[in-house]
Amino acid sequence: MRDWAKARRERTHHLIELGGLVQKAGLVDLTDDDRATLLGAFLDIAGQLQDGNDTAPVDLKARWRRAGLHAFDADRDHAKTTGGNDHD
């Protein structure tokens, strides 16, 4: 496979995974699948990390990472107890 095709496939896979995170967080349903609302939310997050606020960006990222790891662990535990067969 050519390098450009491999890089494109890897990028596509990465973007699909990121979309899955948006879905997993419930943002698609919470925003009624409104792309402008989702983008606005992401821009707000980016602004918090760039401009700062009362909480330092490094502290925000640490808090968000802990929450994300907790959610991944909960999903993994749930999959173990259900056999991973309960898809939405």
Image (cartoon, rainbow, N blue to C red):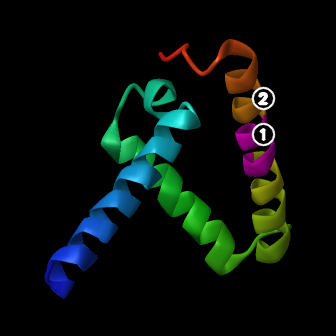
Q: Residue at x 76, y 74 (%)?
A: 57
Front one among 27 and 24: 24
In the rendered view, would you say 78 is above or below 41?
above
Quadrant where the image shows the N terminus: bottom left
For label 2, the SS is helix
Inter-mark Cα distance, 1 to 2: 6 Å
In the rendered view, would you say 16 is above or below 7?
above
Q: Is residue 74 left or right of residue 49?
A: right
For label 1, the SS is helix
Q: Position of residue 56 (x, y in %)?
A: 83, 74
Magenta segment includes 83:
no
Q: Residue at x 76, y 58 (%)?
A: 65
Name the amino acid type tagged 1.
Answer: Asp
Determine which residue is flagged by label 2: 77
Q: Position of residue 87 (x, y in %)?
A: 49, 17
Name the amino acid type tagged 2.
Answer: Asp
Q: Residue at x 66, y 67 (%)?
A: 48
Q: Residue at x 50, y 57 (%)?
A: 42
Determine which residue is flagged by label 1: 73
Point out the stretch of residues depicted in magenta: 68-73
